Amino acid sequence: MDEKLPDLELEIGDKVEHAGIIGEVYLIKMDLERPIAVRFKQGNVTRWFFPDGRQESWNKISLLRLVEKKIKPKTKIKLYRYTYKLGDTIAQTLWTSSEEASFNTVKTEMKYIEID
């Protein structure tokens, strides 16, 4: 029984090395036959690989090595929390991205968070 190699979990934009040459993952297809395309600037060549880094199904070792993960930019989101008065009761909302204060709002808080 063939031993399964671990998935490299490559993403578009990751830098990889194959045979001493640095390339970049530029396409990932939902395909069982070598779904990962790597573009190498030297020679302007594209090579296809399996998710575990093998180039051919009969390869026993991964021929692809991850050099650098693409840094994903984080998204900044503005959140609001409202404190309002209803008669003799004071209540507070949860943090929300909705900017909808009501007429009985007595306090508005705001903060920014970063998400992946």
Image (tube, rainbow, N blue to C red):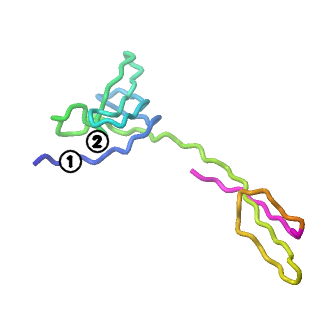
Q: Amino acid at mark 2?
A: Asp
Q: Which residue is mark 2?
A: 52
Q: Where, by quadrant of the figure, is residue 104 drawn?
A: bottom right
Q: Residues within 10 Å of mark 2 (few under 14, many from 20)?
A: many
Residue in view at x 84 percent, y 82 percent: 89
The stretch of residues the image draws in magenta is 104-116
- Closer to the camera, 77 or 101? 101
Q: Could you say where residue 81 lies in the image, as x and y percent from the top left?
A: 76, 65
- The one of 100 and 67 positioned closer to us in this rendering: 100
Q: Position of residue 53 (x, y in %)?
A: 29, 38
Q: Identify residue for label 1.
A: 4
Residue 24 sits above or below residue 41 on the image: below
Secondary structure under tag 2 reads loop
What is the crowding at mark 1: few (fewer than 14 residues within 10 Å), some, or many (at least 20)? Answer: few
Query: In this orientation, which residue lies closer to the viewer: 32 or 62?
Result: 32
**Where is 47 relative to 99, above or below?**
above
Q: Position of residue 34 (x, y in %)?
A: 29, 33
